[in-house]
Image (tube, grey):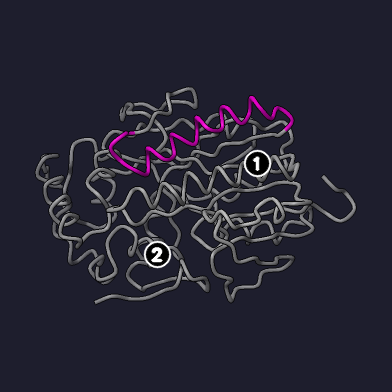
Amino acid sequence: MSSTTGSRIVVTGATGNVGTSVVGLLSEDPRVGSVLGLARRIPEWSPPKTEWAAVDLASERADAAGLLAGADAVIHLAWAFQPTHDPATTWRTNVLGSLRVFEAVAAAGVPTLVHASSVGAYSPGPKEHAVDESWPTHGWPDAAYCREKAYLERVLDTFERDHPGIRVVRMRPAFLFKRESASEQRRIFGGKYLPGPLARPELLPFLPDVPGLRMQALHTDDAAGAYRLAVFTQDARGPYNLAADPPVDAELLGGMTGARPVRLPRTAARTAIATAWGLRLLPASPHLFDAVLRLPLMDCTRARAELGWRPVRTATEVLEEFLRGFQQGAGAATEPLRGRRAG
């Protein structure tokens, strides 16, 4: 990487939850000379050393290789969660769009590719102890999100074999939250009509305690820190788990909100979600719910040892910040993160 003018970093999906944190962090780093943020719509937000390009990476007309020319690293974050009722559309955006990015990285001669994989790429695993990066990444086949993340893991296996001179890093973060993402994530998973004020603790007399509903969370800014470390740690290659402690379950949420956990059978919870999804009242699909019940807990030793990465915030602090943002309709000055209260 250039030592005179600083590194040039291209970030895809630069206006979303993770993208805004990554761009913000890179724009403040003295080792970075410039950041090119790629998004479908150019935002009002103008961080230092950052320029924007409006592009639909899923389009065959997009000149991805031209946009990546001269980059020292590409951080690929672009992803679409919706529409869950049309998995062919998300496949075109997420899988075929990613293939075009990978091909453009090779064509432009970019030396480093950092790809946003996910805990969702993992095959079903344990909830009682954590697994490392060697756990199989075949996803949960019934959930489009997991199926797409797992497929791209296989694509990158081949890409690394065919392009040994390109350093490929795969980040596998837990569920990512921050205050500014609250409105976007409400729309993606709860629907645009779900009122944020319903998240007030006094309105939650009990919490459903579903067997297997135990997962990990991480502040988006802490994930962004790992992405930055991956760019500048020249011997970093392969996958890295990213998560904060403690694991999140009904007991932890009950302690945060004062609500009492009440055991709810998996079938009852899934039936309710499937009904709401089928009526198009809930964007989050029952297939993703099935996957979450089966995702393993992740061991993050490798990220700590090789990248020197440590999350600043606990999972409890992450969720407390997110819930405040949810109640307030928090957002940011980009189209995906626009704030809006419902109800």
Mark 2, residues whose alpha carbon is within 10 Å: few (<14), some, or many (≥20)?
many
Q: Which residue is mark 2?
A: 184
Dot 1: element: strand
Question: Is-magenta flag for residue 145?
Answer: yes
Residue 120 x %, y %: 39, 39
Question: Where residue 154 is drawn, which disc sits there?
Answer: none
Instruction: Kindly identify the amino acid type of the residue bearing the numbered disc 1.
Output: Leu
Residue 289 vertical placement versus 157 (above, below)? below
Quadrant of the snapshot with the C terminus: bottom left
Residue 27 x %, y %: 70, 61
Task: Answer with mark 2 or mark 1, whichever residue precedes in sequence.
Answer: 1
Taken as a whole, is the magenta stretch helix, strand or loop? helix
Q: Which residues are magenta?
A: 140-165
Residue 20 visible in the snapshot: no
Residue 65 x %, y %: 69, 50
Quadrant of the snapshot with the N terminus: top right
Residue 95 visible in the snapshot: yes
Q: Which residue is mark 1?
A: 113
Residues at circles 2 and 1 in contact by the CB criterion of under 8 Å: no
Q: Residue furthest right?
A: 4
